[in-house]
Image (spheres, rainbow, N blue to C red):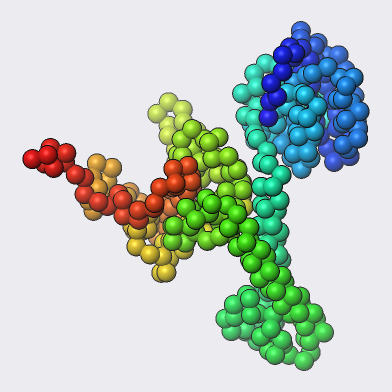
């Protein structure tokens, strides 16, 4: 988030933002500390400190709860604002002498040295942020409802009663009739709360469907069987700008779906995925992958590829046919690897459909390779 200006930036400022106070470290063009202070984490305090009396500067903050409004406010005041990725600042959170003043100084010195070391992030627009808030609010209700349902099931098991399979949407309404008289005072309010949440979740679903229609890209993403309006809207509002990625393949890494690397010499161990990026969107993509690989998933290239991994096989790279090679033994580990692999491919495919607007072809990779010379003949 950089505003073009003809004024040369001489000051570099690091701001360590906390919920109540923000600590500031100002460096001059030679790297000497000019000021170390703190201000209240409020809009009024930031306008007063970084307003007209403050020369245009490069200001570095960490991404967090308050970083979004701070970044937009400082940008409007004319400063060059850098929102650093906290996962890339190990020298700060691993520091043995860590405190807010030192954190602010480290932010300023790294920003003065090389901005790329901060792995700057870009905050999404207000309208997109508001739509994403609806999706996240629905998810919060779903999690609370699930916890209440599990609590009720556990309490009923202590009395020797095991509830039948009931969908979450109908649980609150149906379970009231099954609660023993002695547990009515404890569980009936929970059942009523579950029923109320189910109605509110249904209202969120209707609202999300309406909001999804305002994004033309949603239809392109929903071409894939297993991708619903919630996942499509969450994907679009989380990514916001698809052209921030030069290649669609990098979206998988952005969402933490690629394996970590710790290579040294001849040692190349297989590690778990990084789990970087947006946790909620990654969870949604994993859910879509489980549906694609499940009994109701429609046949397509991604499903075939994932099932091959789940069976301990991987499609051969030098052939589009059914040739496969053995990699790992089929089982729970292979199944998990298949789900993660499909989720990663899904993240890449969704981005590709978004930026190109192409029609999704479920069996594109299964089509035989056409020889141009044979066609010409």
* Quarter occupied by the N terminus: top right
* Quarter occupied by the C terminus: top left
Left or right? Give the position of 330 relative to 282.
left
Quarter location, residue 58: top right
Nearest the viewer among 124 and 226 is 124
Q: Position of residue 129 (x, y in %)?
A: 69, 47
Left or right? Give the position of 239 relative to 69.
left
Which residue lies at the image location 70% right of the left edge and 90% below the top edge? 177
Vertical order, 37 against 293 (above or below): above
Q: Position of residue 173 (x, y in %)?
A: 69, 83
The furthest residue to the left: 377
Q: Is residue 66 visible?
A: yes
Which residue lies at the image location 61% right of the left edge and 48% below the top edge? 237
Vertical order, 366 against 154 (above or below): above
Left or right? Give the position of 146 relative to 72.
left
Quarter location, residue 149: bottom right
Q: Position of residue 310 (x, y in %)?
A: 38, 57
Which residue lies at the image location 12% right of the left edge and 39% below the top edge? 376
Q: Is residue 94 visible?
A: no
Vertical order, 89 against 19 (above or below): above
Which residue lies at the image location 63% right of the left edge and 58% below the top edge? 211
The furthest residue to the top: 30
Quarter location, residue 256: top right
Q: Position of residue 179 (x, y in %)?
A: 72, 87
Marks counted in the figure total 0
Vertical order, 268 against 327 (above or below): above
């Amino acid at each position: 988030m950089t505003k073009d200006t003809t004024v040369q930036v001489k000051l570099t400022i690091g701001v360590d933002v906390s919920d109540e106070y923000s600590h500031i470290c100002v460096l001059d063009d030679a790297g000497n500390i000019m000021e170390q202070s703190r201000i209240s984490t409020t809009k009024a305090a930031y306008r007063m400190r970084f307003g007209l009396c403050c020369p245009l500067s490069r200001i570095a903050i960490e991404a967090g709860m308050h970083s979004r409004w701070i970044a937009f406010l400082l940008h409007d005041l004319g400063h060059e604002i850098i929102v650093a990725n906290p996962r890339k600042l190990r020298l700060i959170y691993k520091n043995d002498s860590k405190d807010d003043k030192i954190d602010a100084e480290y932010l300023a010195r790294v920003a003065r040295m090389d901005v790329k070391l901060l792995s700057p992030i870009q905050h999404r627009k207000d309208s997109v942020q508001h739509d994403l808030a609806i999706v996240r609010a629905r998810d919060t209700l779903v999690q609370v409802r699930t916890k209440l349902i599990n609590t009720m099931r556990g309490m009923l098991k202590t009395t020797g009663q095991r509830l039948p399979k009931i969908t979450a949407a109908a649980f609150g309404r149906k379970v009231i009739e099954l609660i023993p008289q002695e547990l009515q005072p404890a569980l009936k309010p929970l059942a009523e709360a579950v029923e109320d949440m189910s109605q509110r979740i249904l209202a969120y679903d209707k609202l999300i469907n309406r909001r999804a229609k305002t994004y033309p890209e949603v239809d392109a993403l929903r071409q894939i069987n297993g991708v619903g309006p919630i996942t499509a809207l969450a994907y679009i509002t989380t990514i916001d700008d698809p052209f921030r990625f030069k290649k669609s393949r990098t979206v998988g890494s952005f969402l933490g779906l690629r394996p970590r690397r710790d290579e040294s010499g001849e040692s190349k161990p297989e590690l778990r995925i990084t789990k970087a990026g947006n946790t909620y969107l990654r969870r949604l993509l994993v859910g879509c992958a489980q549906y694609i690989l499940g009994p109701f998933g429609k046949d397509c290239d991604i499903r075939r590829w994932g099932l091959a991994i789940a069976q301990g096989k991987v499609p051969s790279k030098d052939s589009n046919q059914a040739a496969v090679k053995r990699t790992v033994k089929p089982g729970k580990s292979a199944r998990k690897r298949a789900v993660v692999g499909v989720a990663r491919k899904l993240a890449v495919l969704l981005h590709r459909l978004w930026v190109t607007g192409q029609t999704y072809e479920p069996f594109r990779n299964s089509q035989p390779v056409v020889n141009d010379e044979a066609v010409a003949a």
